[in-house]
Every structure is written in C-alpha cells, then in structure tokens.
Image (tube, rainbow, N blue to C red):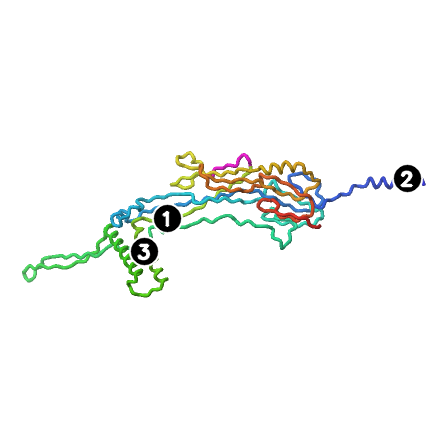
C-alpha cells in the first residue's frame, strides 16, 4: 500500500512539472507601437485613418476690354456707360473645403487570429472598412471624390466681326486740255480710286447697320413681310437680330471676358497648438499672391483655422480610464469635431464642422465575434452586432 502511494505521488509531481499549455483567446488586436509577447498565431494588419484638409479657392478674372470705337460711343449712340480703358479685376468667386483620409502611422494594428475565422474588408491601403460583413450587405456610404474641376467660361471679346469695309470707292472728275488739230480742247474723265475710311466713317456705318437691324426686326415682329412664319422661326430670327445688334454695339461699349481658375491648398493638422495656417495673399488687381507679401499695402490674407470642440470627448476619455480589458479586440476612433473656417482678413468665406480622428480618442472592443461596420473616412464604428463563431 505504501509503495502505491509513493508511485502516485511521483506521478502527480511529474504532471505538475509539465510545461504550461498556451491558452489562446478567440482573437486579439495588438497595436504595432507596443512590444507584444511572442505571436502565437497568424494574422493581418489594419489601420485607422487621419484627415487632412483640402481648400479649393476659385478666383474669377474679369477683363474689361475697350471697344475699337469707344471714342464715338457717346457722340453716335448717346451712351455714357461704356468701357473707357482696358482693365483687369480679380475676385474670390468660391471657397470649398473638403477632407482627405489617409493611413495614420500611429494607428496601425495587428489582428492575431488564434485560429478564429475573421473576414476583414479594407478601403484604400490598410484602412479598415468592416469585419465579418456579408457579401450582400453594403458597407456604408462611400464618399465621393470632392475634387472639383476648374471652371472655364468666357464671353467672346473683340469678336472678329467686320461690319464695314476698310475702304470705299471715290469718284473724281479730272479736267485736262488736249491739242486736236492745232486746237486746244478741254476734256474730262471720271477716275475711281479706293480710299481708306476714317475711324469716324467706319463708326457711322456701324450705326447705320444697327439702325437697319432694328428696322428689319421691327418689320419681322409687326408682320410687315406678310409672310406666315412659324413661331419658332420668328423666335430664332429675333434672337439672331439681337445677337447681331449686341455685337455691333459692343464695338462701342466694349466687352468683358470672364475666366475662372481654382487653386488647391492642402494642410495636414497634427499639432493642437498649430491649427491656424495662412494660405495666400489676395490683391484685386493681381489675384492670389504669395503669403510672404502680406506686408505689401492692400494685400489681404486668406487664413484657414480649425477650432476643436472636444467637450464631449473629455467625458468619454475620463470614463474610458475605468475600462480594463484583459485582451483587446478591434480598435476604433471617436473623432473630435472641429469648426473649419476660411477668412479673408476678418471676412468669413467658409464655415463648416468636420471630424478629425487624430485629435479624438481611440477605444477598443472586447475580442468577441462581432460584425463591425467601420467608416473608412474617420475610423469610427457605424454599426456593430454579435454573431456566432
């Protein structure tokens, strides 16, 4: 009996000295910034995003071009509101601010599977879109590319219209004496020569053309031709008469050419103490200029500012300190809202609240088997529900 007890004791001692078994959790998510213990399973990496700001400023350029017969505008047409000299004016037509998401190098994680069956869905690069999402289930709204194409519109200026010829025929009667049979006879002949018109003569012919157009248009609209035109034909001819008249008048009053150009500025906010940046300077007669010229007289500065509004986050961060998880599941962002404004000196050009993940807080779920729908723009969770393994 004593021998049996001794053998049993030795067997129990051998069992107690056996190497401990590795107990694996369903899965575990490990930040790569930490120094984890030995990795005992395969897995995959994923990242959460941060946001940069793109500011599109559209500048309108207006060129006021003097008409070739502007000096006769008041004399022949009786107008005083015409372009007296060439001039160019710039103005800010539109300001649009958008966000661009990219991988946050401080928010990259390794998912240790531990033989669990997980399906990760990605957006661009490593940014996660979802976990265990079904193939038929949409993974949320995909943000459209907010880049806008540069608008190019213009009015025709100094059209190649030639309302009159540059020369006209002038007939002169020339008298001369000729000897015929010892007798002096006075004769004459009519000579036709081409003479260049003066600017005043050209302007007068244009005015005559304008009067002719108005007369023909009046006859058309009053039915003088006694032709039963269709309504569409009358409308078309009337529009053509108006276009021709406007082109002739523009030779006196001048034309305006408008064009638009969009300039993009990018800013990646990383420091809470540096959320105001000067984008460019602006001058009405030059448009956008280098911000270093802000000391030049009349230069106004275009400024981008982010005002963080983290009152709600402070409460979440304080509460999360009490959460203790032995193993962590998927990490997610709670972005910090910020009011994004663009100003021209003190004039407000744009204002809109936007989320910024890099200034928010990052939390983790428990390593349960979940179906998670992430926002690829901010890294926050849109929906989550438990599923079986």
Which disc number belongs to residue 257?
1
Looking at the rendered structure, the number of numbered marks drawn on it comes to: 3
The residue at the point 36 percent across, 62 percent down is: 231
Mark 2 surroundings within 10 Å by alpha-carbon count, few (fewer than 14), some (14 through 19), many (20 or more): few
Disc 1 packing (10 Å; few <14; some 14–19; many ≥20) = some
Q: From this viewpoint, which residue is outermost toward the right? A: 1
Look at the picture and state if 229 lies above or below 26: below
Above or below — where is 296 with respect to 148? above
Q: Which secondary structure, mark 3?
A: helix
Q: Nearer the viewer, residue 9 or 143?
A: 143
- Mark 3 or mark 2, whichever is nearer to me: 3
Figure quadrant of residue 161: bottom left
- Residue at 41%, 45% in the rendered image: 60
Specify the quadrant of the image occupied by residue 336: top right
User: Could you say whether the residue bearing mark 2 is in a helix, strand or loop?
Assistant: helix
Please report contact status of discs 3 and 1: CB closer than 8 Å, yes or no.
Answer: no
Q: Which residues are magenta?
A: 271-279
Residue 282: percent from left, percent from top:
42, 39
Measure the alpha-carbon separation of dots 2 and 1. Answer: 108 Å
Of circles 3 and 1, which is in front? Answer: 3
Q: Earlier in the sequence, mark 3 or mark 2?
A: 2
Classify mark 1: helix, strand or loop. strand
289 in the magenta segment: no
Whichever of labels 3 and 1 marks the residue nearer the N terminus, that label is 3
Question: Which residue is label 2 attached to?
Answer: 6
280 horizontally vs 121: left or right:
left
Dot 3 crowding, Cα within 10 Å, few <14, some 14–19, many 20+? some
Q: Position of residue 202 (x, y in %)?
A: 25, 52
Residue depicted at 37% across the width and 48% down the height: 257
Q: Which residue is mark 3?
A: 244
Q: CA distance from mark 3 to mark 2?
A: 121 Å
Quarter holding the N terminus is: top right
């Amino acid at each position: 009996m004593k021998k049996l007890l001794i053998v049993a004791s030795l067997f129990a001692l051998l069992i107690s000295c056996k190497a401990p078994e590795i107990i694996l959790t369903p899965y575990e998510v490990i930040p790569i910034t930490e120094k984890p213990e030995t990795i005992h399973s395969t897995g995959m990496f994923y990242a959460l995003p941060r946001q940069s700001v793109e500011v599109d400023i559209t500048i309108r350029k207006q060129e006021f071009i003097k008409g070739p017969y502007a000096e006769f505008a008041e004399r022949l047409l009786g107008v005083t509101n015409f372009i007296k000299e060439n001039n160019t004016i710039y103005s800010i037509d539109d300001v649009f601010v958008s966000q661009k998401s990219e991988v946050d190098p401080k928010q990259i994680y390794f998912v240790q599977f531990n033989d669990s069956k997980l399906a990760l869905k990605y957006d661009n690069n490593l940014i996660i879109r979802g976990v265990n999402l079904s193939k038929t289930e949409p993974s949320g709204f995909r943000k459209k590319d907010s880049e806008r194409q540069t608008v190019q519109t213009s009015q025709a200026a100094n059209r190649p219209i030639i309302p009159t010829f540059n020369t006209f025929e002038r007939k002169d009667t020339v008298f001369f004496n000729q000897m015929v049979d010892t007798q002096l006879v006075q004769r004459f002949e009519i000579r036709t020569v081409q003479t260049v018109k003066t600017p005043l003569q050209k302007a007068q012919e244009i005015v005559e053309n304008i009067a002719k157009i108005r007369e023909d248009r009046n006859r058309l609209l009053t039915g003088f031709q006694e032709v039963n035109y269709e309504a569409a034909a009358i409308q078309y001819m009337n529009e053509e008469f108006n276009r021709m008249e406007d082109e002739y008048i523009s030779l006196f009053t001048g034309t305006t050419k408008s064009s638009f150009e969009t300039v993009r500025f990018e800013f990646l906010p990383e420091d809470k103490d540096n959320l105001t940046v000067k984008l460019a300077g602006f001058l009405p007669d030059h448009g956008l200029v280098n911000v270093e010229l802000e000391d030049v007289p009349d230069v106004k500065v275009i400024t981008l500012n982010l005002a963080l509004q983290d009152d709600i986050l402070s409460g979440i961060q304080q509460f999360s300190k009490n959460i203790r998880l032995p193993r962590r599941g998927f990490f997610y962002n709670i972005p910090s809202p910020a009011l994004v404004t663009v100003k021209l000196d003190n004039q407000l050009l744009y204002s809109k609240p936007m989320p910024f993940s890099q200034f928010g807080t990052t939390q983790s779920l428990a390593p349960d088997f979940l179906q998670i729908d992430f926002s690829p723009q901010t890294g926050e969770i849109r929906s989550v529900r438990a599923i079986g393994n």
